[in-house]
Image (tube, coloured by chain):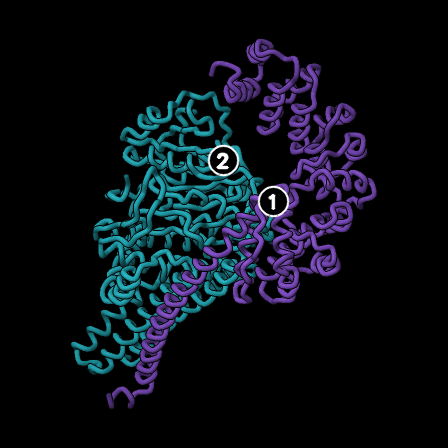
Amino acid sequence: MTDLLTSFILVYFVALNSVYLLLNALAALNLERVNRLREIYELPSVQTTLDPPISVLVPAYNEETTIAATVRSVLQLTYPEFEIIVINDGSRDGTLQVLQQEFGLLPFPEAYRVQLPTETVRGIYRSTIHPHLRVIDKANGGKADSLNAGINASRYPLFCGVDADSILQRNSLQQVVQPFLRDPRMIATGGTVRAANGCEVKDGHLTHVDLPRNPLARFQVIEYLRAFLFGRLGWSSINALLIISGAFGLFKKAAVIEAGGYRRNTIGEDMELIVRLHRHMREGRRPYRIEFVPDPVCWTEVPEDLRTLRNQRVRWQRGLSESLNSHWPLMFSRRGGWPGWVAFPYMLLFEWLGPVFEFGGYLWFAYAYFAGLISWPAFAVFLFLAIGMGILLSASGLLLEELSFHLYPRKRHLAILALYVILENLGYRQLNAWWRLVGLVQWIRQKEHQWGAMKRKGNWQS
Amino acid sequence: MSSIHSDPSLSLAFWIGVTAFLLTLGIVLLILVLRIQRYWQGRREQRFQQRWRPVLMQAVAGDPSTGLPALARRDQWRFLKLWNHMQESVRGDATQRLAALAYRLDCQHTARRLLARRSLPRRLFGIMTLGHMRDRTAWDLLQAQLQQSERISALFAARALIQIDTQRGVHAVLPQLLQRDDWELVRVATLLQEFREALGRELAINLSALPAARLPRAMRLADVMHLHVPGEVMLPWLHAHQPAELLIAALRVCSGAAVLPAVRALAGHADWRVRVQSARALGRLGEASDLTLLTRLLCDPQWWVRYRAAGALTQLPLVSRETLRDLLGSLQDRYAREIFAQVLAERGGADA
């Protein structure tokens, strides 16, 4: 029994990291294609001003300290035609008052069209300074409900959901709209979200990229490269991307409305929508594409203290659980394709159940060694394998970053990142596995959800 | 150590770990090599820019250099990239002066060599160079590229052909523009923007002979590129019996008083998307007498029809702001009133 369990855990660790490595290899191929075309699409004559108009939706709940800066940052986007809709989701602080003062809001007689049911809309305002800025004031219903209200009020065929604390690149909309121009089957594209900690931000825009000083934030920089960025690019290359970050995603409005909009009463509304879109389109035998844009388009402050980070990871795991649980029929379904036959089972085995096996693996080996069930060499080999493969995976993420965007060009950056590639595997990953396990248990116990409160320092802003 | 090798699964795990360790070392080494390579490439690029940018700027400014520096073979690719960027950024005589400079440096030969390369960016820069140089001897080569399945190189070849000989180029390219659904219309419109007039003329001549399946794309092309197609040419496709997709596309581009009766008739079409476009067209082309028809459309069950009808009402000629305010006050239907109030507020035509 001991041998069987030991072998199973070893195989699991090898399989988990191998799949990630495979995704990174797919991402490398995809990046090669992206890089090849970048120098063409950057030519002045190819830069189109005929991009389709976009509605930018900014849901906000108790964001009085950041909302004005966020809206100003969105106002400065370089895109031919877009509107901004801020949805104040029954904030208890002065979010609405700040917006009213900063942007000269006046009540607007909107013929509000209910395409998706939402909580009561109390009023709609329009800026007297920026006519393409509107604010919806509604009763509290959560982030998904706010996004649905924004969709109802939007005028344009594409909408972009943006977190109220996101910092956007000026050309971010141009970047994420490209797949829509290239392929009429496109229904959603996601942008890359990077850690803003340590960077310089002026007037809502990133002016200088640097590494954070906080060790936890540095771990997350590596983690974003290893798990989120290039992994998603890998899935995207086979049209099996199951998540687009809520911080920045562009959607075809008609497809989202047809699928029922964002699901309320869920934590991971961003992932749930993408899985549902896959399922909806596949069941209807409709051709579609969901793509990931690797260029960094959105920057967000990552948690710098353990408590906030823990809450975030617990929330993510619960969101993942809800999304998978709602769409079991996609898995191994006749029309499931790559999402149903590969991405969903992967998510289930390595992301959903991952913390059980990962944390359980460490626990089991420690117990077995101290109980004398396995020898010291066996215990050492396990640690060597688990940590060694983890370091390899993080290093491969760093290599891809070097090959593609090269955002951290200084020698000091490289030295710090190399150090954290190693350190990340000596405690941070294990801690993450524990938090995800907690999230899984909380989901099983069906605890109530709410807007994810995140403690922000914002000391990189000026 | 001996116990590891006595257990096969443990031994395998050990060697996988060793492999991971060696691969990590390899990655570290590769990153270092990349950094060094990037450093030297940056230095070389800097030297190249220092030497060639002033030469190109002089050519743009019309101050021809008497003696050109020699263009090293290893710098040819860099030069073509910089030269094409300049070509794409300037207008008028400067483009011809840049082309003359390229001829002095024998760039047409380099460009032809690039056409045979596997790398897509290299081929594209080859095509672009020949187009900007207006190299008539490259016509056949470019026409062969136009037929390629690779959409980007074919699209760039289309532009190069039109650059070399506008009339002949438009004639050769238009059938492809209408055939190839993989060519993004937005990209087509951007690349061929400067040849709008010639394309519009060619399209108007060919429109009536096009097969029905190609017509919606032809009209979408006309719409995206703002091509002028005379109203009389559009009339046959503005009848209710035509497919909705075609009607929608036709309504978006039609112009002139000749089409007005047909546009009005389509305001009652069963497909709401057609009614939306009819309302929009009336906003563009309509007369004061269309007030009644558009007011009726304000009560349409579809939000977008009501919205476009309201917008069209504010665009009608000879309809004063007071008339619109009076109309708002007289509307009995709640939805019509709401949408009209919204649009008036959007356009600043009434107190919100």
Q: Quadrant of the C terminus of chain A?
A: top left
A215 vs A427, nearest the viewer: A215
Q: Which residue is mark 2?
A: A82
Total tally of numbered discs in the picture: 2
Give the residue at x 51% y 18%.
Answer: B348
Disc 1 is attached to a residue of which chain? B
Q: Position of residue B149 (x, y in %)?
A: 68, 60
> Does dot 2 land on a helix, a strand or a loop?
strand
Q: CA distance from mark 2 to mark 1?
A: 35 Å
Q: Position of residue B326 (x, y in %)?
A: 58, 9
Q: Which chain is purple?
A: B
Which shade of the palette goes to chain A? Answer: cyan
Q: Is residue B334 visible?
A: no
Q: Position of residue B230 (x, y in %)?
A: 77, 31
Give the amino acid type for the residue marked by disc 1 in the picture: Ala
> Does dot 1 land on a helix, a strand or a loop?
helix
Mark 2 crowdedness (10 Å alpha carbons): few <14, some 14-19, many ≥20 = many
Q: Is residue A33 above or below residue A99?
A: below
Viewer-nearest of discs 2 and 1: 1
Q: Is residue B133 visible?
A: yes
Q: Quadrant of the N terminus of chain A?
A: bottom left
Q: Which residue is mark 1?
A: B94
A362 vs B39, nearest the viewer: B39
Give the residue at x 68% y 33%.
Answer: B252
